[in-house]
Image: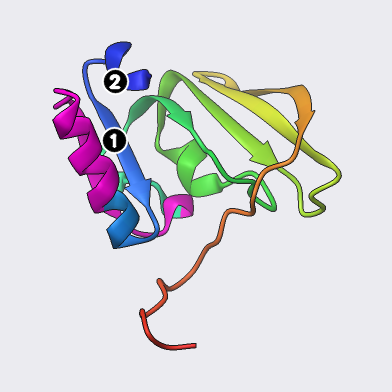
Amino acid sequence: MLAKLARRVYSIERFKPLSKEAERLLIDLGIFNVVFDVGDGSKGWPGQAPFDRIIVTAAAEERPQALIDQLAVGGILIVPVGRDPTAQVVERIVKSESGLQRDTLMPVRFVPLVTGALPVLGQG
């Protein structure tokens, strides 16, 4: 669990009920260093940037520039990338003073990273 490895973990969930349930479970486990927000994860959390590490748990169609921009120098972004679920890969992007280094780590299959306006419950 990341919360045991880091001083603080920031987590963005698209759906408020899932975020609240995760927060409740972690509190029940005595874990208090995770900060939650509800929103579009592809936009990151600019108010808390820069980040040393960012891990994305859904596949972006393309490398999410907003997350790359929020990396600290020396920071690492781990992100599954690919439009076709049968052709996704996990990429490691390292930000340095001289630019970005991108490595493909392995093929994967993730759910898509949904972007845009958050759904209104009870509609559509």
The residue at which mark 1 appears reads as: 10
Q: Residue 29: name its quadrant.
A: top left
**For residue 6, which quarter of the picture?**
top left
Q: Position of residue 18 (x, y in %)?
A: 34, 53
Residue extending furthest toward the right: 86
The magenta segment: 20-42
Identify residue type, mark 1: Tyr
Q: Position of residue 114 (x, y in %)?
A: 55, 61
Q: CA distance from mark 1 to mark 2?
A: 9 Å
Q: From this view, report whether residue 21 is shown above or below residue 115.
A: above
Name the residue type under label 2. Answer: Ala
**Depth order, front residue of 115/103:** 115
- Mark 1 Cα shell of 10 Å, populated few (<14), some (14-19), many (≥20): some
Please give the name of the residue rendered at 63% of the width and 24% of the height, measured from the top-left corner.
92
Q: Give the mark nearer the N terminus: 1 vs 2.
A: 2
Residue 30 part of the magenta-drawn span: yes
Q: Which mark is residue 58?
A: none
Which secondary structure lies at badge 2? Answer: helix
Q: Is residue 70 left or right of residue 96?
A: left
Disc tally is: 2
16 and 6: which is toward the camera: 16
Q: Does the magenta run of residues contain 106?
A: no
The nearer-to-camera label among 1 and 2 is: 2
* Mark carried by residue 3: 2
- Whether residue 47 appears in this view of the structure is no
- Quadrant of the rendering where the N terminus is positioned: top left
The structure residue drawn at horizontal position 22% and vertical position 23%, both measured from the top left corner, is: 8
Q: Is residue 5 left or right of residue 115?
A: left
The answer to which quarter of the image holds residue 104 is: top right
